[in-house]
Image (spheres, rainbow, N blue to C red):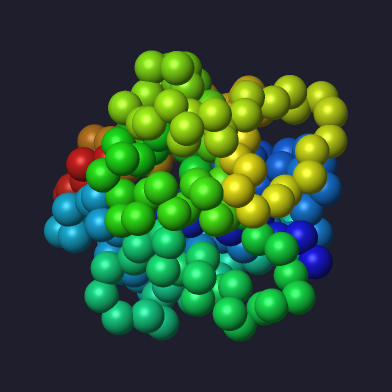
Amino acid sequence: MKIGILGGSFDPIHSGHVYIGLRLCEVLTLDQVWFMVANVPPHKDKRAVSGAYHRYAMTVLALQEHKQLLASTWELEREGRSFTIETLESVGRSWRNDRFCFIAGSDSLRDLHSWKDYDKLLLEHCCVFVQRPGFEVNVAGLPLAQALKEVIQPICSETHHEIQPGRSFLINLNPPPVSSTAIRETLASGGTPSLDWLSPAVLRYINKHRLYEDNPGSS
């Protein structure tokens, strides 16, 4: 199978995440997209991230109507911080007959050079960077070596593309302009997020457990 791995805090998961998963199944002809809930994301303040159980539960609820989108506990079961390169290598060893690609927002490209073994990540794996509204990135301006910039290919979302190791894509899918930060801030101020942002099941879960009432977090 061809499988995309969309890693993130999902704090909370929103309609933009789901849209990206569904669209990439079409554009990259993926059989599945795994929403890999991060344990302790290396680039985030641990204090600003909700408990793993809540984030995983919300992800399950958001994806329950889409059979090709699956919530994964892979990183939650690992101890310590979550590094992308280690996750991909570990998954590859466990599912040797499948092909994987890592999916992230384009804003992550700006600090990709600070990631663990980022050069190995680009040269030995397939990565897909999705342009975020308001955070569009130009590959030419990235703080990466020219050889690594050439690995990242801008592609059109209207045609199909094959995932291969050592081949990475930058794509604009025009996802909904919503962010987890905006949702947390709305809830922290006593407001109710639009159902265009969250699935009803996720919003009910948030209200039931009184999540985000006091601290909107930092990202």
At x 38% / y 37%, what residue is drawn?
108
Residue 34 in the image, given as x and y percentages of width and height: 62, 62
- 75 or 192: nearer the viewer: 75
Residue visible at 60% across and 73% down? 92
Residue toward you, 86 or 209: 86
Query: Above or below — where is 164 with respect to 68?
Result: above
Q: Residue at x 17, y 53 (%)?
A: 45
**Does residue 65 show up?**
no
37 lies left or right of 99: left
Q: Nearer the viewer, residue 91 or 46?
A: 91
Looking at the picture, does residue 41 appear above or below residue 119?
below
* Image x and y of residue 74, in percent: 49, 76
Residue 121 screen position, x and y as percent:
46, 53
Q: Is residue 129 left or right of residue 8?
A: right
Residue 75 to residue 27: above or below = below
Q: Is residue 33 visible?
A: yes
Q: Residue at x 78, y 53 (%)?
A: 30
Q: Quadrant of residue 179?
A: top left
**Quarter of the image that includes the N terminus:** bottom right
- The quadrant of the image that shows the C terminus is top left
